[in-house]
Amino acid sequence: MFRKAIIQLLAAILLIAAACQSGPTSLVLISKDYDNRFAEWLPMAGRQCKPVNMYTVSTDSIAYYLSMADGIIISGGPDVNPVIYGKASETDRCESIDNRRDSLELRMIRYAMENNIPLLGICRGHQILNVACKGSLIIDIPSDYDTTVIHRKGGEHMVRIVEGTMLSDLIVPDSGFVNSSHHQAVENLAPGFRAAAFARDGIIEAIEPVDLDGHPFILGVQWHPETLIRESENHPFSLPILLRFMEEVHKVSR
């Protein structure tokens, strides 16, 4: 209990300190914002920002918004088309697929990586980040992976952070419970990436570049930090990720 209180106190101090900083309004692009959850989450970092729901942006305006981006978030959603990662024959085992969204998010990821824009992938975003960088996905966990861990929507399970990763520097406890809403997962890691967190059954729950000096911030997490914070404003698997992401976003926008 004492350790938890200390963690919450430190998170609160960071939040207050961030709120006291002034600076320009940062433009953060979200691939698709459901129910304005990111519009509500981002301001909790205490920095001025303007979120843009890129799914509602016209095709001829995408390049403009990318050129103005200070940060990019690839959010959760439907399955990534397996054609993209060499499993076209297994398309019928997927759930809903949105090809327009696939192409939009691949474009956003590549722009972020090529232009040193802070990039955060969440759930589907974590998966398509791996795919964009030449990794692959498990098509269906219940069918293809022997596990008793509930990964589907409404699930909650323990994750373990890998020591020595950037994520381990952000999150104080090396393990904890997170929300879970997926039936697919990272299979083969993309070249140049490493696993930063695992579920108890070995499913990869977070990825990041091996070379942390090559880009200001790239992180993919399988859970939903933007909704975890609704359970607790100082949730250790939400607030630290938000604060670090927005810190890097703020540096770009200066």
Image (cartoon, helix red, strand yellow):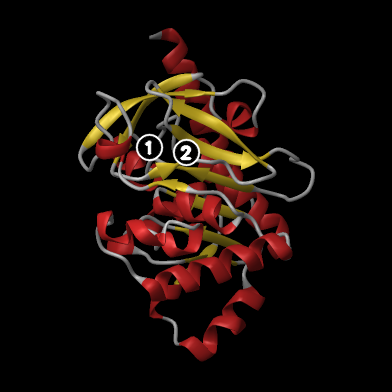
Q: Are marks 2 and 1 in contact (CB under 8 Å)?
A: yes
Instruction: Look at label 2 and name its amino acid.
Output: Leu
Residue 97, quarter of picture: bottom left
Q: Is residue 84 placed above or below 46 in the rendered structure?
A: below
Residue hosting label 1: 233
**Residue 67 pos. (x, y %):** 66, 77
Q: Residues within 10 Å of mark 2 (few under 14, many from 20)?
A: many
Q: Position of residue 149 (x, y in %)?
A: 27, 26
Coordinates of residue 91 in the picture (x, y in percent): 32, 60
The quadrant where residue 54 appears: bottom left
- Quarter the C terminus occupies: bottom right
**Total number of numbered labels?**
2
Quarter in which the N terminus is drawn: top left
The residue under the point 64% across, 29% down is: 165
Residue identifier under label 2: 239
Residue found farthest to the front:
89
Q: Is residue 70 visible?
A: no
Q: Nearer the viewer, residue 121 or 194?
A: 194
The quadrant where residue 88 appears: bottom left
Judging from the image, what secondary structure is the residue with disc 2 in?
helix
Q: Position of residue 118 (x, y in %)?
A: 64, 55
> Dot 1, crowdedness within 10 Å: few (<14), some or many (≥20)?
some
- Check the image and name the residue furthest to the bottom: 60
Which secondary structure lies at badge 1? loop
- State the residue at coordinates (74%, 51%): 215
Whether residue 174 is visible, yes or no, is yes
Nearer the observer, 154 or 80? 80
Q: Residue at x 31, y 36 (%)?
A: 179
